[in-house]
Image (tube, rainbow, N blue to C red):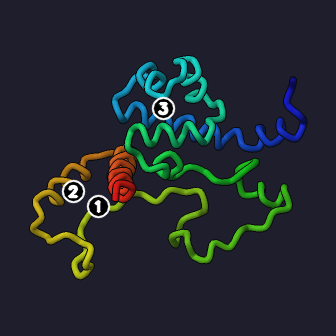
Amino acid sequence: MSKGTGERQETERTRHVDAAVSRRFRELREALGLTRRQVAADMGASEGRWQAYESGQRIPASRIWQFCRRYGLDVSAVYAGLPFTIGPVGEDAADARGEVPVDTGGSIAPGLVAGMAEEGAPFEPVSGNPHDPAPDDAALRAIAEVAADLSPLERNLALAALKGIRSHKANRS
């Protein structure tokens, strides 16, 4: 049975999102130092299926959750910095579709356009915040030193791992 016209059109409109998520899956796998074969085995999928996921085939949400849970990542790591527009991208795209920009209520940082990623800032504890560790915390200093040498992707991966640890701890309580 073939896809209906509406489903085909939807697939075409979201292909750029599927391609970006696929690239991110490959980047995350490589950052974790895993082969496609290892991930496929861990996920209970064939290597060919995983290659298809990394080559732009739409990845089921359940696979995304399974991958993140298996490797201790926060799901936001998969989507961090990815485009979240649907359809043609560009200045005239919204006009061409007759869409009106959505008011985010200031949730996008000043100077950024929706869909743009903000560059990571150096990690420095802010004094006065009761949740910030003491400035003499050796473990925190060690984490900051390592984080300073990471690429933006590696920083996002490390942050996702830490969020995953926090989430895992919360689920155990």
Q: Considering the numbered disc 3 on the image, is that residue within a helix, a strand or a loop? A: helix
In this picture, residue 25 sits left or right of residue 169: right
**First in sequence: mark 2 vs mark 3:** 3
Nearest-to-viewer mark from 3 and 1: 3
In this picture, residue 168 sits left or right of residue 62: left
Q: Considering the numbered disc 2 on the image, is that residue within a helix, a strand or a loop? A: helix
Q: Quadrant of the N terminus?
A: top right
Disc 2 from disc 3: Cα separation: 26 Å
Which numbered circle lies on residue 144?
2
**First in sequence: mark 2 vs mark 1:** 1
Disc 3 from disc 1: Cα separation: 26 Å
Disc 2 from disc 1: Cα separation: 8 Å
Q: Considering the numbered disc 1 on the image, is that residue within a helix, a strand or a loop? A: loop
Identify the residue at horizontal 61%, vertical 62% (top origin): 114
Image position, residue 110 (x, y; %): 52, 72
Q: Give, as a three-letter code, the residue at label 2.
A: Ala
Give the crowd class for mark 2: few <14, some 14-19, many >=20 residues within 10 Å.
Answer: some
Give the crowd class for mark 3: few <14, some 14-19, many >=20 residues within 10 Å.
Answer: many
Image position, residue 155 (x, y; %): 34, 49
The front one of 162 and 25 is: 162
- Answer whether labels 2 and 1 touch (C-beta < 8 Å): yes
Identify the residue at horizontal 50%, vertical 36% (top origin): 25
Residue at image mark 3: 26
Q: Give, as a three-letter code, the residue at label 3.
A: Arg
Q: Give, as a three-letter code, the residue at label 1.
A: Pro
Image position, residue 33 (x, y; %): 34, 29
Identify the residue at horizontal 36%, vertical 52% (top origin): 168
Q: Quadrant of the C terminus?
A: bottom left
Identify the residue at horizontal 50%, vertical 38% (top origin): 66
Residue at image mark 1: 122
